[in-house]
Amino acid sequence: MRLKTLEGMDVSGKRVLLRVDFNVPMEGGRVTDDTRIRAHLETLRILRERGAIIGLVSHFGRPKGKVVPELSLEPVREAVKILTGWEIGFCEECAGEIASKRISEMRAGDICLFENIRFTPEEETNDASFAEKLAAPYDLFVMDAFSAAHRAHASTEGVTRFLPSCAGKLMEKEISVLSEVREKPGKPMVMILGGAKVSDKIKFIRNMLDKTDVMLIGGAMAFPFLKAQGKQVGKSLCEEGTEHIASDILKTAISAGIKLILPVDLVVSDSPENRTNASNIKVDDMEDGLMGLDIGSETVDIFSREIGKANTVLWNGPLGFFERAPFGEGTKRTGDAVCRRTVKGAVTVLGGGDTAAAANLLGFSDGVYHISTGGGATLEFFEGKELPGIAPLYEQ
């Protein structure tokens, strides 16, 4: 199926409802990471240069249908303004008379950010009358929030019933790159899996097994696999009751001829707070009072060698407690190996919010081919699901 995009769309003088994801980290009323804002700038620039009248709609946090002042999007408006140098308006209502009046007063090239869409309970229930009210002042809907595309909400799926709709540039890129990796990855393909929970990734792993040649498993996700092999995991974070899932994946991978590699050594301490007591030990030397907080140096070398032979790398989940030194070193060195392979022409894709955060914090985000803005949306895409925020964007 062919995706409907901005190419060929006449947006001059048209009122465009642009769904973005400005759900960004914030402290003290200031945005601390503008990665998601920057991801939408190409779409915004194109619409602005072509003379569209742009209404920006986003969620922020989980206000659960109530007005929560600390979850207002107004501070994000200032971040967008600083980042772009453009005048960005703000409206305290996202749908209704005030919002409609604001749109009617705008001119070609104007941009206005509307208040947190989740302050309205009908957003998450995908209420049809609310979706119609949201769509009413506009001529066209552009869906650019891939990270919200797995939610059938009024501002992602509902408005498509009332407005001509297409994908923005970020959405277009996400679908193009992720589809290539999901459907026809260059061989050999290496999957790097980390993070905390096997259960969150089970469908993702199973759907990608027939595409994968090598699977590298680290982070807390490795411990159910090590436990399934009869190894001790000490006090390490190990999702309870998932050893049978890990054992099943191990058996399936072996029967499919996939090389599944687990850590052979770990960086351990008695707690994440105790950095001075960190040491690198063999997996077989784990003791009851220790926690595995990062993959060890020998494991990094093994992982790096496999990455060095890949033509496709798909990475979901950090490989250690990356927020605290020295427990981010394994993730950083693995990221550096991915960057080196990217330079050689490999398609390297990072997915998931924590993975992107690790890449930004540890300084290897710029060297990767593509960092997906989606967390749950990326996982569900690789599970093979039809995402409700994407389905209406295809030509019928």
Image (tube, rainbow, N blue to C red):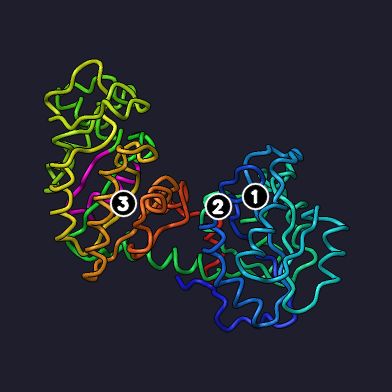
Cα separation, mark 2 vs mark 3, equals 20 Å
Q: Residue at x 84, y 63 (%)?
A: 100
Specify few, some or many for label 3: CA neighbours under 10 Å numbering under 14, 14-19, or 20 or more: many
Specify few, some or many for label 2: CA neighbours under 10 Å numbering under 14, 14-19, or 20 or more: many
Q: Is residue 204 magenta?
A: yes
Specify few, some or many for label 1: CA neighbours under 10 Å numbering under 14, 14-19, or 20 or more: many
Of tags 2 and 3, the one toward the viewer is: 3
Helix or strand or loop: what does disc 2 sit on?
helix
Q: Quadrant of residue 312?
A: bottom left
Helix or strand or loop: what does disc 1 sit on?
loop
Query: Does label 3 or label 1 sit earlier along the sequence?
Result: 1
Of tags 2 and 1, the one toward the viewer is: 1
Q: Quadrant of residue 339?
A: bottom left
Q: Height in image: 374 above or below 202?
A: below
- Of the 4 image quadrants, the one containing the C terminus is bottom right
Q: Would residue 382 be found to the left or right of residue 331 on screen? A: right
Which label is found at residue 44?
none
Q: Is residue 244 magenta?
A: no
Q: Residue at x 22, y 66 (%)?
A: 186
Query: Does label 2 or label 3 sit earlier along the sequence?
Result: 2
Q: Height in image: 184 above or below 256?
A: below
Identify residue for label 1.
Answer: 59
Residue 224 appears in the figure: no
Name the amino acid type tagged 1. His
Which label is found at residue 315?
3
Query: Does label 2 or label 1 sit earlier along the sequence?
Result: 1
Q: In the rendered structure, which segment of residues is drawn in magenta? A: 202-218
- Residue in front for this viewpoint, 353 or 250: 353
The picture places residue 274, in percent across and down from the top left corner, at: 33, 25
Identify residue for label 2.
Answer: 148
Name the amino acid type tagged 3. Trp
